[in-house]
Image (cartoon, rainbow, N blue to C red):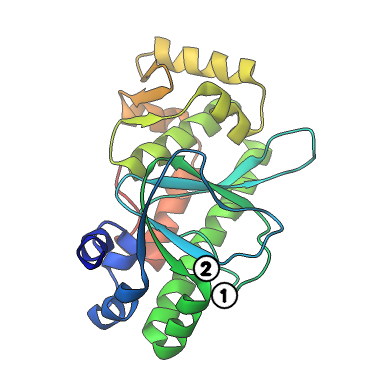
Amino acid sequence: MIAPVVEELRSNGLLARLQEADRIRLQPHFTVVDLAQNDVLQKAGEEVVDTYFPCGSAMASFNVWVDEDRPGIEVALVGREGAIGGIVSNGRVPAFATASVRTAGRFLRIKVATLENLKLESIALRHWFARYSDCLIAQVFQTAACNATHTILQRTAKWLIAAGARTSSPEFEMTQDQLAEMLGVGRTFVTRVVRQLREEGIIDTRRGIFIVKDEQALRAKSCLCTTAIENHFDAVLHGIYPAA
């Protein structure tokens, strides 16, 4: 699978911007995998053994469970700007959050232990992933603040902007039930917000599909959390965060 690996390395921004020597160092250890929506990449409490890099429009998210009777709340969304699994912890330790595929697509997979050994061979590679860890933690921090202070409308708009940017398309797969679960609110609240955005001509929906029709108007409905994350990525990893 060498040829597909070479091609997919260019479709993950974090890998595409590596020094050539580091891409060559990593390339033989990757496996290309095609994953479906809701496929689980890591489970909370279980040892993390693989690191996944979303390619192209593929997208995954981290979810944290707050109690046994409710679904997990999304704390971070990861697309082609990043990676999932063993990035922040730097080793095979139990996962705190569950990570699953949000938008089906192609991922590059590498063993966490292998990636750790390769990082020991290259200080540039080690520093590059440390920078991404900083950006990922910043996203989690901002999400925590957003969930505590902003309205459902603002949070919905923020999520739709982020999803649209990562999928490189105004259309992406998502049901209103899934959106409600990620926001940690009831389906009726999301239904009202989606109806408002649709009536104002900002979005449209089909069965299991959201369509962003006016991205600027959607930003006007959103909080400033999206801009804060974009600015931090730009400062720490310039050119990595997907443009809307």
- Residue at the front extreme, as displayed: 1
Seen at 54% across and 25% down, the residue is 153
Mark 1 surroundings within 10 Å by alpha-carbon count, few (fewer than 14), some (14 through 19), many (20 or more): some
- According to the picture, the residue beneath numbered tag 2 turns out to be 87
Q: Considering only vertical position in the picture, is 137 above or below 216?
A: below
Quarter of the view holding residue 177: top right
Q: In terms of secondary structure, where does tag 1 sit?
A: loop
Q: Considering only vertical position in the picture, is 37 above or below 187?
A: below
Kind of residue at badge 2: Ile
Q: Is residue 20 left or right of residue 129?
A: left
Q: Are marks 2 and 1 in contact (CB under 8 Å)?
A: yes
Q: In terms of secondary structure, where does tag 2 sit?
A: loop
Q: Considering only vertical position in the picture, is 204 above or below 168?
A: above
Q: How far is mark 2 from mark 1, CA to CA?
A: 6 Å
Quarter of the view holding residue 31: bottom left
Q: Is residue 179 left or right of residue 161?
A: right
Residue 90's disc number? 1
Q: Where residue 224 sits in the image (x, y, percent)?
A: 48, 42
Identify the image quadrant of the N terminus: bottom left
Viewer-closest of 214 and 132: 132
Kind of residue at badge 1: Asn
Seen at 28% across and 35% down, the residue is 169
Viewer-closest of 96 and 123: 96
Viewer-closest of 130 and 87: 87
- Residue at the top extreme, as displayed: 199
Q: Where residue 132 sits in the image (x, y, percent)?
A: 45, 66
Mark 2 surroundings within 10 Å by alpha-carbon count, few (fewer than 14), some (14 through 19), many (20 or more): many
Seen at 41% across and 90% down, the residue is 121
Q: Where residue 14 sits in the image (x, y, percent)?
A: 35, 64
